[in-house]
Image: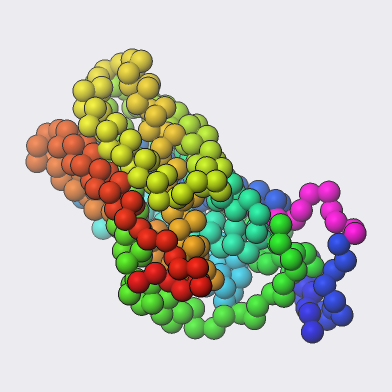
Amino acid sequence: MLVHVNPTTDSATPLAAPPRSPSRPRMHRAWIVAAVTFVTIIGGAAFNSLPGLLIDPLHTEFGWSRGEIGLAVSIDMALYGLTAPFAAALMDRFGIRRVVVVALSAVAAGALASVWMTAAWQLMLYWGLLVGLGTGSMAMAFSATVTHRWFVARRGLVSGILTAAGASGQLVFLPLCAWIVDRHGWRPASVTVALAALVVVPFVWLLMRDHPADVGLAPYGGTYVEKPAPAKGAATRTLRVLADAARTGPFWLLAGTFAICGASTNGLIRTHFVPSAHDHGMPITAAASLLAVIGVFDVIGTVFSGWLTDRFDARRLLAVYYALRGVSLLFLPMLLGPSVHPPMVFFIVFYGLDWVATVPPTMALCREQYGEDSAIVFGWVLASHQVGAALVAFLGGVARDVFGSYDVVWYAAGALCASAALMALVIRRAPRDGLVAQ
């Protein structure tokens, strides 16, 4: 027997048959769910605008080394990644809406509590633990879950749009937080991030639904399917999926390339670009504005990458993206200076287009290789992304303390991107019978 869940009460009532198609709404509910997801990721990603802006203010006020501050950022990034696969399984067990509301509350609590911190361990607790767990629960595995449940057609496009939400948050909050830090200090900026997360909660609770069957619809571009029963043993399932995927070659290649992706974006540019530019005499507000420009072109590049992923081989797309990213990083040390000039603007535009263009093809390869478990597998691949980001966030700060410059970090990241391009090319296609390639 089919079950219909009232969208306002979540109560279940039996249905005799799937809903009839003649009374189709003007806009499919999937697009509303995608819009709420987009806004949620923006609200949750607001915190990601802070670390690069606060390294120098925290170093000045508390005397903490850049390595200590980088360690707190790396804890946040690592937990962001390690939480993601468990969050995907928890969404299967308890529903998307409940998990996301709790996650937004954790981000708000961590950002707000940091206002009263006086020791480095508190920075690691509030930024690292609370914010890491919260943002990890709304990571790209969240996007993958929504895309997989609500869309059959346009999956590449939707995954690109939802991935761009993080960049949109950067576009909105980076200039705002930079201005607040410059004029009023870092504490009001942290409060702003907490409020941004809390504002999104009502939208999630009122408009988000876990499955198309909850509102009696088929997924966009697909046929009606019943909502599966809540999956019990979320943690066990997450670890089982990891164990199964870890026995396959494509998983390690996807995890390796995505670790380098995280190292060269969140770990490197997002965390260390602003202090590195400041080392060369550029004002913090100008450097933050350049990162915001990355956010503008990130949206364009990611959506376009989703469109390309629906039409071309994802392996070749990844190879091109990583190769071009590596070349651009090799030129960056020569471009940094006290003012913004055309070559630097060209780098920012180019890097923005490539920033997370890797996500739609990586999601597509996870779906191709792992089917129904693809959201959880992608969560583990995302964990590798954040572990790579965490290592570079920490090691980049240590390198700056030791060498007095970030140059060696830029060159090393460029070499890593070249290796990622080669790794992407050797990922084998999944067999036609649907079994995962060994």
Q: Residue at x 45, y 68 (%)?
A: 431
- Answer with left or right where residue 26 lies relative to residue 73: right
Q: Image point 77% across, 64% down: which residue?
A: 217
Residue 324, image x, y percentages: 33, 35
Please, what is the dominant secondary structure of the magenta stretch? Answer: loop
**Residue found 49% across the figure and 56% down from its top:** 364
Answer whether residue 266 is magenta in the image: no
Residue displayed at 53% across by 59% down = 144
Residue 154 visible here: yes
Q: Pick whichever, 65 or 119, lies toward us.
A: 65
Task: Tell me residue 251's x, y (percent).
Answer: 36, 65
**Between residues 278 and 29, which one lies in front from this camera angle?**
29
Displayed quadrant of residue 204: bottom right
Q: Position of residue 140 (x, y in %)?
A: 48, 56
With 269 as the anchor, is 87 left or right in this view?
right
Q: Is residue 25 magenta?
A: yes
Residue 62 horizontal side relative to residue 403, left or right: right
In terms of depth relative to the viewer, which is nearer, 59 or 385?
385
Pick the quarter of the image with the C terminus. bottom left
Q: Which residues are magenta?
A: 22-30
Residue 139 in view (yes/no):
no
Determine whether 163 is above or below 286 in the image. Answer: below
Quarter of the image with the N terminus is bottom right
Query: Which image quarter: residue 5?
Result: bottom right
Nearer-the-camera pick, 239 or 191: 239
- 332 vs 248: above or below: above
